[in-house]
Amino acid sequence: MGIGSVGTFASWTDDVTVAGTTFTAGTLDLQVNNVDSYATTTLSMSAMVPGTTSAEVLTVKNNGTVPSKYTLTGGLTGTNATDYNAAAANGLLLTVRLGGAKSGATCTGGTALVTDQPLTSTTTTTILAKRPSTALTASGGNEVLCFQVKLSDTAPSSLQGKAATATFTATGTSDIS
């Protein structure tokens, strides 16, 4: 005689799917006066004499989707750029004012970020170190900067008739802090 048993072993299972999770990288789009490449002659000066100034207001804007910090570099190019290099503190001097306004050929008001920094033939000279991302928040954060260039009151006679072109570059970096 034998004893037997018949049984069924079963377990239930169920799955759930999580869908719709999309990952999209943010964008960083730094602009000056609402364009990606800005050229100006407003800051230019001709027939300079010692003490002559010129000014222009430029707006650095974050048109991207992520907060941005930025650095501003600049300097002089052209055939006579090295002549201004040799003059250093007696050559072309740059002042940048945050929130400043143009009044004739000078910048007024706002906060001085740079005062009388010599422009040299090194176009990668740091003018403004990392500006905080609180200024360039995503989608439209901006800083209004007034640039003033002055031919030093003590410019040497050797600069007479010498021309150079100033170039400035704003370089943005995303900020996740």
Image: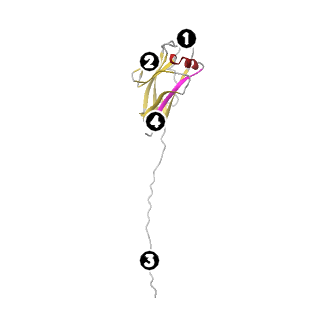
Q: Are marks 2 and 3 in contact (CB under 8 Å)?
A: no
Sequence-wise first label, 4 or 3: 3
Q: Callout 3: helix, strand or loop? A: loop
Residue type of the residue flagged with mark 1: Ser
Q: Callout 1: helix, strand or loop? A: helix
Q: Which mark is residue 68?
A: 4
Q: CA distance from mark 4 to mark 1?
A: 43 Å
Asked if residue 167 can be seen in this view, the reply is no
Residue located beneath label 1 in the image? 157
Instruction: Please identify the residue farthest to the left as the structure is shown.
Output: 109
Instruction: Please identify the residue farthest to the top as the structure is shown.
Output: 157
Q: CA distance from mark 2 to mark 3?
A: 96 Å
Q: Look at discs 4 and 1 and give the one toward the viewer.
A: 1
Q: CA distance from mark 4 to mark 3?
A: 67 Å
Q: Look at discs 3 and 1 and give the one toward the viewer.
A: 1
Does residue 117 sit above or below 69 in this rendering? above
Q: In which quarter of the view is residue 3 placed?
A: bottom left
Question: x, y percentage for residue 159?
Answer: 56, 14
Residue at image coords 46%, 35%: 68
Sequence-wise first label, 1 or 2: 2
User: Which stretch did the figure color magenta?
Assistant: 68-78
Residue located beneath label 3 in the image? 7
Q: Look at discs 1 and 2 and give the one toward the viewer.
A: 1
Label 3, residues with CA under 10 Å away: few <14, some 14-19, many ≥20: few
Question: x, y percentage for residue 70?
Answer: 47, 32
Q: Which mark is residue 106?
A: 2
Sequence-wise first label, 2 or 4: 4
